[in-house]
Amino acid sequence: MHSTECGFSTSTNFESIATKDTNGNVQTPGNYEWSVTANTLFVDKDVLDTDRFDTLELLEQYLAQEEVTIQFMTNIGQEVVIAGNAYMSGVNFSAPTEGSATGDFSFQGNGDFTATRLPTVGALPVISSSSVIAITNGTAGTRATTASNTPTLYELVGTIPSGVTINATSGLISWTNAVPVGNYLGAFIRVTNAAGSVTQEIAIIVT
């Protein structure tokens, strides 16, 4: 659901032709192939989140051999988007006893891809607040989220303990006095502005 690293690759098939006019072979470009890979961190999906796919949904598409539409974005000011139709060609999961479950997904392009340069709309948000939120069970509190470049939306996604919420407009994180004790890894703050969204992984530690 949350890609930590993505890759795009394309290669063109060439046909070598020997002619009497050259000592070396002449290369004639033919069709090309392209593929996309995504390294992913597994997190819980909000039932209202229709823009992302969780692990089960991706597996269902893989088993059904469904053609999917994918986009690869450079995410530097969102200036380049590569898009096309593809089939999921491989899935690899890892679920260690301690730590977060991860997965690698491979997509094989089907037909052409397009590359589009988007208009410059400013810089993405930069989150500078701490990636650790320390909470004492039995004590309510708040913590501000600091981000630059005029954020318009703040969200908490992933593994969030009950009682912890965020103000979507101000970014203020607050919690009640009854947050369950535990170390909540796989939690994220997502900050959005006109240029797009950035995500910061956080650790919520409740003692």
Image (tube, rainbow, N blue to C red):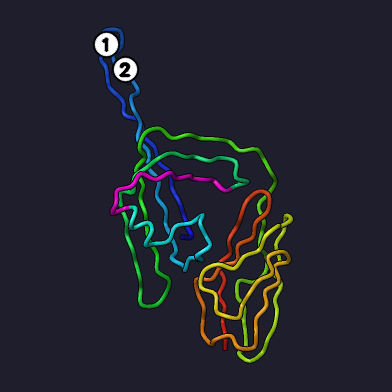
Label 1 neighbourhood size at 10 Å, few (<14), some (14-19), many (20+)?
few
| Residues shaded magenta | 62-75
Q: CA distance from mark 1 to mark 2?
A: 7 Å
The label number, if any, that marks residue 19 in the structure image: 1
Mark 2 element type = strand
Mark 2 burial class by Cα count in 10 Å: few <14, some 14-19, many 20+ = some
Q: Is residue 194 left or right of residue 86?
A: right
- Residue 104 x/y as whole percent: 37, 57
Q: In this picture, is 23 found above or below 82?
A: above
- Which is nearer the eye, 198 or 52? 52
Taking the image as shown, residue 152 lies to the left or right of residue 68, namely right
Left or right side of 98 for 52 = right
Residue at which label 2 appears: 26
Residue at the location (49% across, 39% down)?
A: 82
User: What is the x, y in percent for residue 31?
Assistant: 34, 27
User: Which image quadrant for residue 103?
Assistant: bottom left
The amino acid sitting under disc 1 is: Thr
Q: Is residue 207 above or below residue 85?
A: below
Image point (25%, 15%), residue name = 18
Asked which quadrant contains residue 57, the reply is bottom left
Identify the residue shown where x is 54% and y is 45%: 74
Q: Which mark is residue 175?
A: none
Q: Would you say the residues marked 1 and 2 are in contact, meaning their CB atoms lie under 8 Å apart?
A: yes
Pointer 1 or 2: first along the chain:
1
Quadrant assignment, res 146? bottom right
Q: Amino acid at mark 2?
A: Val
Q: Is residue 117 magenta?
A: no
Locate the C terminus by quadrant: bottom right
Residue appearing at x 66%, y 71% in the figure:
166
Helix, strand or loop at mark 1:
loop
Residue 159: give x, y in percent of width and height: 51, 73
